[in-house]
Structure formats: C-alpha cells, structure tokens
Image (spheres, grey):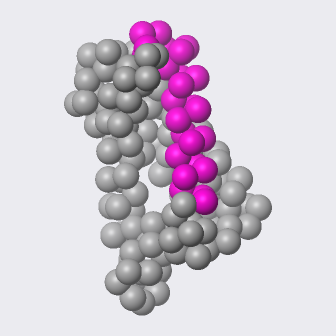
Amino acid sequence: MASITAGLVGGLVATIVMTAVMMAMGDGGPPPTARLVATFAGGDPEEYAMPGMVLHLLYGIVAGAVFAVGVPLVGLSLGSIAVAVVLGVVYGLVLMVVGMVGWMRMVIGMEPDKGMMTMFATVHVVYGLVLGAFLGAGILG
C-alpha cells in the first residue's frame, strides 16, 4: 500500500511532468487555474499566471495523496507497476472530466475548444501515467 507521503511526492512529480507537457502543447497563455483565480480575485487571468500554476501544483499534490489512499480503500492494489499505471491513467481521465465539466464549465464558465480539450486530456493522461508508475514502483513505500 502506498503511503500518503508517497502520494504527495508522486503527485508533485506527476504535476511537474504534466505541466512541462502542458507548456509544450499550450498556446503560451495562462493555465485554466489562472482563470479560476481571476474569477474570484477579479482582473485578467494573465495577471494570475503564477498563482494559477501554484494552485495547479497544489491540486496535483493533493490528488496524488487522494489516489494513494483511495485506491486501497476501494479494494484495489498498486502492487505492480502495470496495474498502477492503468489505474493512474483512469484516475487522470476522471480528473480531466471533473476539471473540464466541474471547474472549467460550471465554476469559471469557460467553454473549451477542441484543441483545449485535446491538450487537457493529454496532460491528465500523462499525470495519471506518471503518478501510477511512481506509486507502482514503490519508490517511497
């Protein structure tokens, strides 16, 4: 069973990799989390690029811990890298749907175009793959 610490570190590593892919694929604009910050703080999302990135990093770290603790709670095991990667990818896709429907559409009123949805799906799959591999490898127990 993966520890909370392993989940937190795995979430950090996965979010860093995900963010690098997001920056490579993106349009150079601020992340959707910057728009979320701007929605509540007022102003332009461009002004909140760094707070948006910090918020995204925190989401990813916490989501890693939730995965590490949650998978065993539903009766599954992260005992092998292959299973952990598959579960991680599924988890990444769930996070994508929650992010796209819950945060983007319902909270900040953003309607992502096809390019944004493709990028969003890709980076969340990358997040899940890296998180699953990290936890499945048992790097931190």
Q: Magenta includes 79?
A: yes
* Outermost left residue: 5
- Residue 89 visible in the displayed image: yes
* Numbered circles on residues, count: 0
Identify which residue is drawn at 55% across, 52% down: 98
Quadrant of the drawing holding the N terminus: top left
* Outermost top residue: 80
Identify which residue is drawn at 28% across, 27% down: 6
Quadrant of the drawing holding the C terminus: top left
Identify which residue is drawn at 32% across, 53% down: 58
Horizontal side of 112 relative to 83 (left or right) equals right
Identify which residue is drawn at 60% across, 60% down: 101
Whole-percent x, y for residue 23 in the image: 54, 57
Whole-percent x, y for residue 83 in the image: 53, 15
Residue 91 or residue 54, whichever sits in front? 91
- Residue 134 visible in the displayed image: no
Horizontal side of 16 relative to 90 (left or right) equals left
Q: Magenta includes 33?
A: no
The residue stretch that appears in magenta: 77-101
Residue 47, above or below 56: below
Horizontal side of 47 relative to 21 (left or right) equals left
Q: Quadrant of residue 122?
A: top right
Whole-percent x, y for residue 18 in the image: 50, 46
Residue 29, above or below 73: below
Residue 56, above or below 44: above
Residue 119 or residue 24, whichever sits in front? 119
Whole-percent x, y for residue 64 in the image: 37, 37
What's the magenta bit mostly, secondary-structure-wise? Answer: helix
